[in-house]
Amino acid sequence: MSPQPTTRIPEILKTHESSLLNEWVREQTPHLASQRGRISDADLREQSREFLSLFQQAAQRGRLDTLQDPAWREVLELLNGISQSRAKQGFTPAQTANFVISLKRPFFARLNQEYAKDGAGLAEETWRATVLLDELALHTVTSHIKMREEVILRQQEEMLELSTPVVKLWDGILALPMIGTLDSARTQVVMESLLQRIVETGADVAIIDITGVPTVDTLVAQHLLKTVTAARLMGAECIISGIRPQIAQTIVHLGVELGDVITKATLADAFAVALQRRGLAMTRAAGR
Amino acid sequence: MDRIPILKMGNILLVTIQVDMHDRLALALQEDLTERISTTGARGVLIDISSLEIVDSFIGRMFSNIAAMARVLDAATVVVGMRPAVAITLVELGLSLPGVRTALDVDRGMELLRVSDERNPVVHVAGTEDGGALGAS
């Protein structure tokens, strides 16, 4: 690695730390106007103070041209914490990035003062500081988005668990009301829970209701047929119900072959078939 | 070499697979079973695989083959007690065992065989399609 080029940034940061902080906090306030109440002035000031002091210390020890330097680790961790807490509070990525970017104006003002008589030096130092602060800002955006993605992933998993109930309709008859789009991961979960319930209850008819499935394309149909086949291998018969008119049209247009699977328009029709298969019938109670 | 025992109950042959199948064992079973069907004139074959935990495409195809061979010898085949994991594996392997009837447990398997036996009595006109009775669900 090349030796660090001469720079007065660490020194400037150190000398002007407290006045920088004041100006920076003032600079940030207008950006957060729409988020008033989500973060208090005291918190903002505390976060800024902590960042500035770590930033200043890291600048003394580490290289200014790369964040890979171990000296920056604490600063990055602090930024992670801040952007994650802001992501949870509902800040936009831009607002989160502004936390770092708004430091530029007061900081550049200081550089301007210090290099008043040295134009070339000022340009060089300004560039150095810009690169560094931009990198830090990008880091906050990355960690903000990562946080959001984690939230989405968790919600997806929760939805997956919630959306595959297998209900017992009658002795030996199971129903599986499917809601939402069927992808391979969900089919796997659906298949496993259905087969498990077939073993537990000894059911020999299972009704798969797809009223809540928004679209049926070839892939979804294939997933459905897989589930039906697996249930058949276990010795249970499957009926697919809840096929809406549009879906019936799509299935035919796509040329999807449902084979010898029984399909019904409504769950009630499918239930009637299931009862019939088990040799049961429903009658109106006498005298009603 | 160990072999899988084949029990005769009335006019039904009962096969319980209790060990992990390997290819030679499967071929031996196929051979023994066809032999027994033709000597005993059995009308049904019930294969219990409730203790079978691992299947591969070869074993999966063997079930289809056994069912097809039994059908040629005029016996219906029912595979009972397949585990969920096994069913999922077979489906993922693309084996849906066409022509093989399945049931949840031995009781229901016996019931299926009894029904198909009634529909397809011993004295039947030559050339009658019995695959229809077997394949109908």
Image: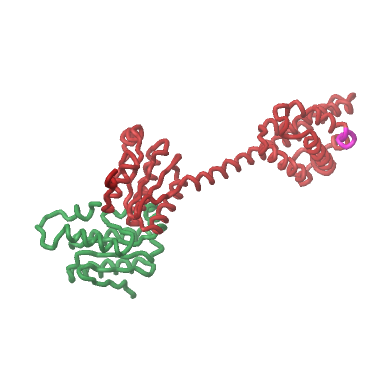
Chain colours: A red, B green
Determine whether, in the image, residue A219 is placed left or right of residue B29.
Answer: right
Question: Residue at horizontal 37%, vertical 69%?
Answer: B18
Bounds of the magenta segment: A12-18
Q: Which of A145 and A127 is in front in this view?
A: A145
User: Which residue does the image show at 20% across and 62% down from the upper left?
Assistant: B75
Asked whether A129 or A271 is in front, the reply is: A271
Image quadrant in which you'd find residue A130: top right
Rendering coords of residue A112 (x, y %): 86, 26
Number of marks in picture: 0
**Residue B37: horizontal and vertical position, in percent?**
20, 68
Left/right of residue A246 with respect to residue B70 in the rendered view? right
Magenta: main secondary structure equals helix
**Hey, which quadrant is residue A235 in on the image?**
bottom left
Q: Quadrant of residue B33?
A: bottom left
Q: Can residue A173 be seen here?
A: yes
Q: In which quarter of the image is the N terminus of chain B?
A: bottom left
Judged from this view, the residue extending furthest toward the front is: A287
Q: Residue A14 magenta-drawn?
A: yes
Q: Is residue B129 left or right of B91 when viewed as pictured?
A: left
Horizontal and vertical percent position of residue A236: 33, 54
Residue A1 sits above or below residue A171 on the image: above
Q: In this view, does B7 lie to the left or right of A65?
A: left
Residue A121 within the segment the image draws in magenta? no
- Residue A13: image x %, image y %? 86, 35
In-front residue for pair B132/B96: B132
Q: Residue furthest left?
A: B125
**Can residue B69 be seen at all in this image of the molecule?**
no
Q: Residue at x 74, y 42 (%)?
A: A76
